[in-house]
Amino acid sequence: MTIIIDGKAVAAEIRQEAKGEATTLLEQGITPCLAVVLVGDNPASKAYVGSKVKACEEVGVKSIKIEMDADASEEALLAQIEGLNNDASVHGILVQLPLPKHMDEDRIIEALDPSKDVDGFHPVNVGKLSIGIDCLTPCTPTGIPELIVRSGIEMSGKHAVVIGRSNIVGKPMMNILVQKGNKANCTVTCCHSGTKDLTEFTRQADILIAAIGVPEFVTADMVKPGATVIDVGINRVDDASDKRGYKLVGDVNFDDVKAVAGAITPVPGGVGPMTVAMLMKNTVKAARMLHGIG
Ligand code: L34
C-alpha cells in the first residue's frame, strides 16, 4: 500500500508546536512578530500571504501585512525593509516572491537583516546552512524532512535525488539533506535542465524530490518501486469544470506515480501547508535568537 503523506496533518502538528513555543515567549513578555511584504496583486501570492497571516493568528504570532502597488519603486521597498530591520518589535521579515520585474530580488534579499530573514534567503544564512551553523533556513525545503520522518520513513543513509536547482528549493534542499542527523544524512544528487539521461538518476532515488515547475513532469517510469516521492510543484492549470477555473497540480503525475511509489505527497495538501507551518517555527526561532534565548 502506498502511503499518501498528509501534509495538512503534519503542518497542523507543527503549528501546534510553534504555538507552544510562542506561548513560552509570551510568558516572558515577548510577542513574536512577523512582517509580510506583498508587492503587486499576483493572485497566488495573495493567497499564500493570506495563509501565512491566518497561521500567525492560530499560533499566537503578531502579523503585520504591508501591501505595495505593483509599480512601487525598488527604493520604496528598500525603505520599508529598513524600517522593519530597525523596528525591535519585529522579529521576522518576509518579502513574498516573485517581485515585479523592475525589482532586483537579490538586492532586496540582501537588504534584509539576516537575523530577521525567516525565509533563510539572505547570503549570510545560505552560507551558514552550507557549513552547518544553526541559522534560519528556507521554509519549503526545511519542511520536507519533517514531512518524511514524521510519516515514519527513515532518511539516514538513503539516496536523495533533487530535481531542480533554484535558490528557494533545490539548492537549500541539497544542503539540508547532506547534513548529519536523522532528519538528513542522505547521499545527495541534484539533477537539472543540464542533466543528461535524467531517468537514469531519478530511478536510483530512495527519496525523489521534484521542484521543477513543470506540471506532472515526473512519471512512473522515472521512479524506483517503493521510493518516497515529494512533490514541491504547485502549478495552476486551466480547468473549466472547477469553479475557480483552474486546478492545482504538482510536478509529479500523481495517479501514475502513486502506483509505484512507496510514499507520495499530494498537491494540494502536501508540501504547501508545510511551508507555512515552518514559517511559524522560523518566526518563533528568530524571536528567540533576537532576545538571546537558547
Ligand atoms: N519569500 N516567497 C517567499 N517565501 C516563500 O516561502 C514563498 N513561497 C513560494 C512562493 N513565494 C514565496 C510560498 O510561500 C511558494 N509558497 C507557498 C505557500 C503556501 C502554499 C503553497 C506555496 C500552500 O498553502 N499551498 C496549498 C494550497 C494553496 C491553494 O489552494 O492555492 C497546498 O495545499 O499546497
Image: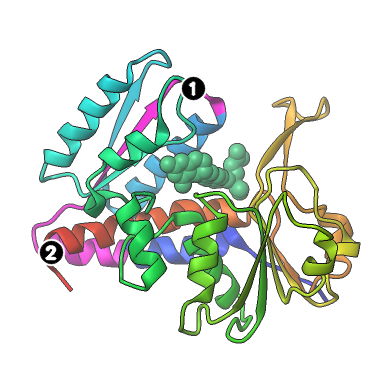
* Ligand 1 has an atom within 8 Å of the beta carbon of the residue at disc 1: no
Q: Which mark is residue 27?
A: 2
Q: Is residue 63 above or below residue 293?
A: above
User: Where residue 179 appears, x then y in whole percent?
Assistant: 47, 77
Snapshot quadrant of residue 241: top right
Q: For the residue carrying disc 1, how many other residues have a C-alpha within 10 Å: few (<14), some (14-19), or many (20+)?
A: few
Q: Secondary structure at mark 2?
A: helix
Q: Secondary structure at mark 1?
A: loop
Snapshot quadrant of residue 238: top right
Residue type for callout 2: Glu
Name the front one of labels 2 and 1: 1
Residue type for callout 1: Lys
Q: Residue at x 50, y 78 (%)?
A: 183
Q: Is residue 43 above or below residue 69?
A: below
Q: Residue at x 57, y 56 (%)?
A: 170
User: Where residue 45 appears, x then y in whole percent?
Assistant: 50, 32
Q: How is the image coloured?
A: rainbow
How many badges with numbers are in the image?
Answer: 2
From the viewer's perspective, tell me whether residue 158 is left or right of residue 128.
Answer: right
N-terminal of the pair, mark 2 or mark 1, is 2
Mark 2–mark 1 Cα distance, whole angstroms, equals: 43 Å
Q: Residue at x 20, y 57 (%)?
A: 287
Quadrant of the drawing holding the C terminus: bottom left
Q: Residue at x 37, y 73 (%)?
A: 132
In the image, 85 versus 257, the foreground residue is: 85
User: Where residue 15 appears, x then y in whole percent?
Assistant: 41, 60
Residue under circle 1?
Answer: 101
Give the magenta part as a residue range.
Answer: 19-43
Q: For the residue carrying disc 2, how many other residues have a C-alpha within 10 Å: few (<14), some (14-19), or many (20+)?
A: few
